[in-house]
Amino acid sequence: MLEYAVIASGFLVSGNVDLRQRKLEAIFCPTVLASGTLAVQGNTDTTSGNFVRMLETRSPGSGDFQFAVGVGSRWLPWPADVPQPAYARFEIVTAAGSLQADNRTLTLVTRPR
């Protein structure tokens, strides 16, 4: 099943994605900013101030859970050994902190839990 998350023009973070009944299998990411990576924010509810970047738990001390996307479109499989949050947001992280100049729609491949 396909779902979508949009990062609007002038922003770096998508809206909320409800994953309580869905298992995220992969993300199709369009071309984003040149130095960009795609970070994932998680939360247990939809309270905006409680969304925080997920931590990469597979390697101690490795920092934020991110996907390198750069200038090309990417197909990003969700790692089976990484738990997913009840609610997610997707964030473009850039070295310069530049805002996205156009809408970017992420296609989320999901299946029922």
Image (tube, grey):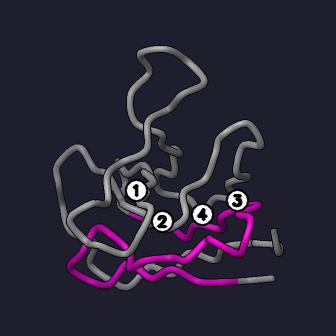
Magenta-drawn segment: 3-32
Number of marks present in the image shown: 4
Q: Residue at x 17, y 54 (%)?
A: 97
| Secondary structure of the residue carrying numbered label 4 | loop
- Nearest to viewer (mark 4 / mark 3): 3
Query: Does the residue at mark 4 contact the one at mark 3 (Cβ under 8 Å)?
Result: yes
Pick whichever of labels 1 and 3 is earlier in the sequence. 1
Rendered image quadrant of residue 107: bottom right
- Nearest to viewer (mark 1 / mark 3): 1
Structural distance between the alpha carbons of marks 4 and 3: 7 Å
| Secondary structure of the residue carrying numbered label 1 | strand
- Amino acid type, callout 1: Gln
Label 4 neighbour load within 10 Å: few <14, some 14-19, many 20+: few
- Amino acid type, callout 4: Ser
Q: Which residue is under mark 3?
A: 75
Structural distance between the alpha carbons of marks 2 and 4: 21 Å
- Amino acid type, callout 3: Trp
Drawn side of residue 50 relative to residue 4, left or right:
left
* Quadrant in which the C terminus is drawn: bottom right
Q: Position of residue 32 (x, y in %)?
A: 42, 65
51 up-or-down from 109: above or below: above
